[in-house]
Amino acid sequence: MTKKVELRVYGMTCDDCVAHVSEGLKGTKGVLDVIVSLKDGKAEVLINDAVNPKELENIEVFKKPSHYKAQVRRVKDE
Amino acid sequence: MSEYDLAIIGIGAAAFSAAIKASELTSNQMKIAMIGYGALGGTCVNVGCVPSKYLIEASKSFRNAKKMVYDGMESSVTIDFNEFMESLNKFVETEREEKYTKVLKNFKNIDLYDGKAKFIDKNTVTVNGNKISAFNFIIATGSKTFIPDLKGLVNYYTSDNIWTIRKIPEKLAILGSGEVALELANAFSNFGSEVHIINRSNRLLKGFDDDITNELRNIMAKNGIKFHLGVDIKEIKNNKEKKIIFYNGTEQPIDVDEIIVAMGRQPNIEELCLEKAEVKYNHGILVDSHMKTSCENIYAAGDCVEQELKLETLAGKEGAVAAGNILGSDESINIKEIPWAAFCEPNVASVGYTEKELKLQNRDYIVRKIDLKNVVKANILKSNEGIVKIISDNEKRILGMQIIAPHAAEFIIEGVYLVKHRLTYDDIINTSHIFPTVAESVKIAGQSFIRDISKMSCCME
Ligand SMILES: Cc1cc2nc3c(=O)[nH]c(=O)nc-3n(C[C@H](O)[C@H](O)[C@H](O)COP(=O)(O)OP(=O)(O)OC[C@H]3O[C@@H](n4cnc5c(N)ncnc54)[C@H](O)[C@@H]3O)c2cc1C
């Protein structure tokens, strides 16, 4: 079953940041698709059962020394 | 309705620390609401640590100037108490402006709301009728002075308004025997008041072993403070000039010019409607070691939390830990690594476990205690009444330290590192201390684990 996860992402200031966060999310097991918005500081992430939505907050791109931080806001079954 | 990433209820130490940490961790992108009433900065800067330390340090300076302790010296000093208290209040204003008002201006991501917050559900509070919603909450509403229900107790000061006093009372009663009571007693005694400490409990301070509190009481009594402990006040009669305190039992009534109530503090939680957010509480808000409440998205920090210590440093640490954990960290607080001090003279300070606690837990321990008369610097200062007590486990690791000594609040930090990093009394002995300092008393107490210090020269390492 796939789920759509809305993440609040902090720390992005430019398109490079968007690319960095997108890559980090896309490289995570269970992540099928990612749309990151710089303006809203948000990411929409499509996942399957291989990943728990909460685990997305602690993937490499959101861990120290990275200055990006994320928090799950909503999870919807697709 | 305004929507935020984080709403912090409170504008004191815990709240500021949480707001700054959350801002730092998110490159100032977290949208934060800070809600509170009264002066910015809360208790510590306005009516707590800052004015009380200003008062006590000034009072020590006055007393020292008045009673020169070295032979061949005499002085005459006077005090304009009104002018002094004006300067104290000016100092508080400046500190508040510099450390809180100006600091907040650096954070465009923080909106300040003036008013009381009440939960209507776990994501929403109302403030002056307006709704504020947030994904995360930190409750940092602090505590307030407990006022007992005593017949005739109508005209009194507390630590909230003692800063308005403009005349040194000739005779002063302080109800309570905790740290706030002892500090104010010491300060007014230094300024020349006859101070009476009155309390129903027989003990001074909480969280210390009895040998320490007994020693402190003896020292303060020698310095002129009068103790009425284990007494039960029946009523207070007020006439134009005096307040007369009557007891149940045999203790004689006393008449005083002023009364300060300092019988402890209670968490500020009853107006928050915590049930609406399913936040559990007892006397204070119940949290886990990560500062999370019973509600997933709500954390709490500082004096409003159910915990044994009420401190600015602890409030600040808890605020920062709560903010970090909201943003994915995994930080917790070990209360046994938090130092505590009262700034009466001599200072009393502690960290870690007391003997009493270890006995209750049936744990093995070794304890050593030295008299401050073994410390050359204390003798030089002519302030050599006090104790350093260190407790270790059977593997020599330091479990706790309690000190009565001048400047103890400055050097209890050595005990904090020892307890936090599970260091041993060998580590104390093998670390050079400055001679002569009062802090060297910790080294001598460490040495007392391995040798008889009465047979030790002061250069012995
Ligand atoms: C006389 C005195 C001396 C002290 N000396 C020391 C010392 O030397 N060292 C030390 O470490 N500690 C000391 N303390 C303790 C220290 O001041 C407190 O532990 C610390 O200030 C607590 O901070 P806080 O942020 O938890 O609460 P506070 O600073 O009390 O802030 C709480 C805030 O919450 C707000 N609030 C309350 N209810 C609501 C509501 N419903 N909605 C919105 N806002 C609300 C209040 O307006 C207030 O601003 C002293 C305390 C006193 C009284």
Image (tube, coloured by chain):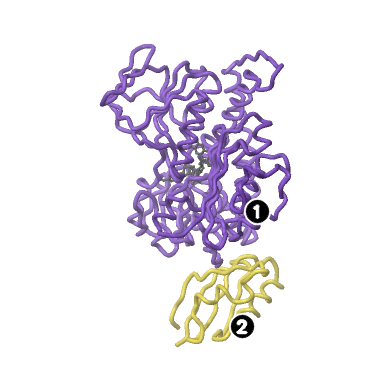
Foreground pick, B299 / B361: B361
Q: What is the drawing colour of chain A?
A: yellow
Task: Residue at 57%, 35% (x, y): give it.
Answer: B50
Q: Amino acid at mark 2?
A: Lys
Q: Is residue B29 above or below residue B273?
A: below
Task: Residue at 45%, 42% (x, y): give it.
Answer: B115
Separation (CA) of disc 1 from disc 2: 52 Å
Q: What is the drawing colour of chain B?
A: purple
Q: Chain of mark 2?
A: A
Residue at mark 1 shares a chain with residue at mark 2: no
Residue under label 1, please give it.
B428
Q: Amino acid at mark 1?
A: Ile
Q: Is mark 2 within 8 Å of ligand 1?
A: no
- Viewer-nearest of discs 1 and 2: 1
Foreground pick, B278 / B288: B288
Instruction: State the mark number for residue B273.
Output: none
Secondary structure under tag 1 reads helix
Q: x, y (%) of residue B7?
A: 49, 54
User: Relative to A37, is B182 on the left or the right?
Assistant: left
Q: Is residue B427 above or below residue B150?
A: below
Q: Is residue B257 above or below residue B221?
A: above
User: Relative to B233, is B27 on the left or the right?
Assistant: right
- For the N terminus of chain B, the image quarter is bottom left
Task: Residue at 57%, 86% (x, y): give it.
Answer: A29
Q: x, y (%) of residue B125?
A: 41, 53
Residue under label 2, please give it.
A26
Foreground pick, B262 / B73: B73
